[in-house]
Image: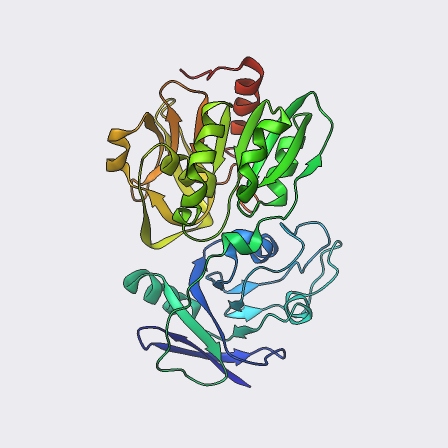
């Protein structure tokens, strides 16, 4: 059956709609440039409600397994590909990608010129789209507040190490938790709506997690978040990075088409080294707004110069826009977890 992805500006892309299709699906359409890592993308809460376009022409050749999901469910609303592999041969595979999407009631389009679609997103900016069995000419954008849809409801604790880390949950990924647990720490995951409970847990440090949507959705909770940051060694990742910036008085803004992929070069101003990073975000910290804050830029994106990481001038608070846990993507930045654990152990910022 024919299917169509209709963009807000009137452009329409034709393909073949999957077997599971019941009604039109609307969401922000974004593209991911990695050749692998599709299972992690589909289950990452940071993609909540989005329609993801995979730019690599063949997706799904190693299938879906029981281990690589970043959450317990598929988070995307729809998927667009040029070709979805029917046959999988990886020894860990339990499903093909198509079977997995259909079992989770997620429609997808194949046969779409994804490179041309990506060019349209790059030139016109990220926008909403509708995936349907016929072109849709006029529609209103959805109002979304995805962070409130994906965060947990209760505080949960993992591991039993001597250091106790609190992870503020804006829509956390399993791989961030796994990366922390490798350092023999105990991690309590705290919904951001319950951040006032931080002091009751007697934490040694804080990690602010990734999450979907606009960082300014957390504005009502910023005073409590800033109080927690001021009293704990802290490390923000992706959404957590943006929230730290907002908490200390900086501003955030939306990129034209965001950074999503496993190959973004980032430069560390402290060491002069460049490394590849995994990224998934629509918003960035406005560098000019840092002038009135106690924060300084440490990392920046080599492609467009945008802020990729911050350090507090006096407190043991640091942040990165990219994903050091590297799922999916390169492991170049995993040393940041080591740095953070050292900060927590010493109680001071080792770089200041």
> Could you say where residue 63 lies in the image, as x and y percent from the top left?
67, 60
To which quarter of the image does residue 309 belong? top left
Q: Position of residue 126 (x, y in %)?
A: 35, 61
Q: Residue at x 59, y 77 (%)?
A: 18
Report the label total.
0
Instruction: Examine the rendered structure and indicate whether residue 262 appears above or below residue 137.
Output: above
Inspect this view and state whether residue 331 appears: no
Name the residue located 55 percent from the left edge and 80 percent from the top edge: 23
- Residue sitting at 53 percent across and 24 percent down? 340
Query: Quarter of the image holding residue 123?
Result: bottom left
Q: Position of residue 235 (x, y in %)?
A: 49, 30
The quadrant of the picture occupied by the N terminus is: bottom right
Q: Give the position of the C terminus as an image quadrant.
A: top left
Q: How is the image coloured?
A: rainbow
Residue 285 or residue 338, whichever sits in front: 285
Residue 335 seen from this side:
yes
Residue 185 vs 260, above or below: the answer is above
Horizontal arrangement in the rendering, residue 118 relative to residue 109 (left or right): left
Q: Residue 128, percent across and down?
A: 39, 67
Q: Report whether 144 appears left or right of 301.
A: right
User: Is 198 above or below relative to 85?
Assistant: above
Q: Quadrant of residue 28?
A: bottom left
């Amino acid at each position: 059956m024919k299917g169509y992805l209709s963009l807000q500006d009137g452009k329409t892309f034709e393909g073949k709609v999957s077997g599971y299709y019941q009604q039109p699906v609307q969401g922000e359409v974004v593209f991911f440039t990695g050749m692998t890592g599709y299972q992690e993308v589909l289950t990452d809460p940071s993609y909540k409600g989005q329609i993801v376009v995979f730019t690599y022409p063949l997706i799904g050749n190693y299938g879906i397994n029981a281990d690589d999901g970043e959450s317990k469910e598929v988070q995307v609303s729809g998927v667009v590909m040029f070709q979805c592999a029917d046959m999988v041969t990886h020894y860990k595979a339990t499903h093909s990608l198509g079977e997995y999407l259909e079992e989770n009631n997620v429609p997808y389009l194949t046969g779409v010129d994804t490179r041309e679609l990506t060019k349209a997103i790059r030139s016109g900016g990220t926008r909403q789209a509708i995936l349907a069995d016929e072109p849709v000419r006029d529609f209103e954008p959805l109002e979304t507040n995805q962070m409130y849809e994906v965060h947990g409801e209760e505080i949960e604790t993992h591991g039993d190490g001597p250091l106790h880390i609190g992870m503020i949950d804006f829509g956390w990924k399993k791989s961030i938790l796994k990366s922390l647990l490798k350092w023999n720490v105990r991690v309590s995951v705290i919904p951001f709506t319950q951040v006032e409970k931080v002091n009751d847990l007697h934490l040694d440090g804080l990690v602010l997690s990734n999450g979907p949507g606009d960082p300014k959705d957390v504005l009502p909770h910023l005073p409590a978040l800033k109080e927690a940051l001021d009293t704990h060694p802290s490390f923000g990742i992706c959404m957590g990075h943006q929230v730290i910036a907002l908490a200390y008085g900086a501003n955030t803004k939306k990129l034209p088409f965001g950074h999503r992929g496993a190959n973004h070069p980032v430069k560390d101003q402290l060491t002069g080294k460049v490394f590849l990073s995994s990224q998934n975000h629509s918003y960035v910290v406005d560098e000019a707004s840092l002038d009135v804050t106690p924060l300084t830029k440490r990392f920046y994106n080599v492609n467009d110069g945008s802020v990729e990481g911050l350090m507090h001038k006096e407190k043991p608070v640091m942040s990165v826009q990219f994903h050091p846990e590297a799922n999916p993507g390169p492991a170049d930045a995993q040393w940041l977890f080591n740095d953070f654990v050292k900060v927590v152990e010493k109680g001071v910022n080792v770089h200041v």
